[in-house]
Image: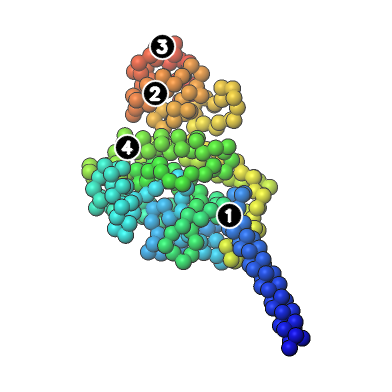
Amino acid sequence: MISACRFATGQFTKLRHKIGLLALAIVCVAGVDAGARESKDWIVLENCRLISNPANDGDSFHASSGASEYIFRLYMVDAPETDEMNPARLVEQAKYFAITVPQAIEVGQAAKEFTRAKLSEPFTVFTRMSDAMGHSKLERFYAFVQTKDGDLGELLVRNGLARNYGFKAVPPGLRNSRLEVEKLQQFEDDAKRERIGGWGINGERLNVRAQKPTPFSVFVTEKNARARTLPLGNTPSATRAFRHSVTNVGPVEAKKSHAKEQIELGRIDINAATEKELRMIPGVGPVMASRIIAARPFRSADDLKKVNGIGDKKYATIRPYFQ
């Protein structure tokens, strides 16, 4: 009897040991999965293609990279909903644009079509596989999306189809998100002033697009880096250690420096330059930059003389910097 009890006790002890090892293994695997899901480095997916899906909208959509399918949600911008599935959010979006809920849905549908058109050709995705949540079985990840015309989020905001709002991240090549937030706000202000997209729906200007050249961001990898498609299983471990820079398609090529940034003559668009870009011009401070922005639109840079505080001497100094 005593021998049987000892045997049973020994077996129970072995079972507890095995259960403990199994539990430890599960915890370790879970930790690996969580770490693999969100990368500290930017993952670059090139030659992505849009996948048609009823759930796609202006700022969230299905896309393929090689044999893998993903759902991406744009960082830092928010396009209105395309239906009434999320009424509270829709009401908040309508209030932001100062329009009705049905009109907000119209703007959302226009944003969806705009994104579909911009992603009709292969595009590049920059992601860290950060979970953007959602209602689909397929995980949704935050991303910056590069089209042939520039950053998709910036394009949406500049055309009045999205607002400067949402989950922030430091874009590839930048040290903080502040510069991108300021740029998006400038684009939103321009769209509002021009009354296009959602800002002009009451004037039947929903489908009017920005006509003036705009410096949209372009995120690129170094020439020596080779972007690869993520392997099946949506794990980002295969494409780490990329370093990125940012170039701007537009009038100003900024250099990161504490000194006054240097710019080339004849490169600035008088109607599209941000306050920061205007202040890069020798002799233009924050007050003068604000006056120039307030006086827009200009027929050409020759109209700078009409701005309060710009006399013949000041005009002769700053005019060469404009297109």
> What amino acid type should be assigned to the residue bearing mark 4?
Lys
> What amino acid type should be assigned to the residue bearing mark 1?
Glu
- Please give left or right for residue 244 compared with residue 100 in the image: right
Give the SS element for disc 1.
loop
**Mark 2 and mark 1: Cα distance apart in space:** 41 Å
Q: Earlier in the sequence, mark 2 or mark 3?
A: 2
Residue name at image x 46 percent, y 19 percent: 285
Q: Determine which residue is flagged by label 1.
A: 38
Q: Earlier in the sequence, mark 1 or mark 4?
A: 1
Q: Determine which residue is flagged by label 2.
A: 290
For disc 1, the neighbor class at 10 Å (few under 14, some 14 to 19, many from 20) is some
Give the SS element for disc 3.
helix
Q: Earlier in the sequence, mark 3 or mark 1?
A: 1
**Mark 2 and mark 3: Cα distance apart in space:** 19 Å
**Mark 4 and mark 3: Cα distance apart in space:** 32 Å
> What amino acid type should be assigned to the residue bearing mark 2?
Ser
- Quadrant that contains the N terminus: bottom right
Q: Determine which residue is flagged by label 4.
A: 192
**Mark 3 and mark 1: Cα distance apart in space:** 56 Å
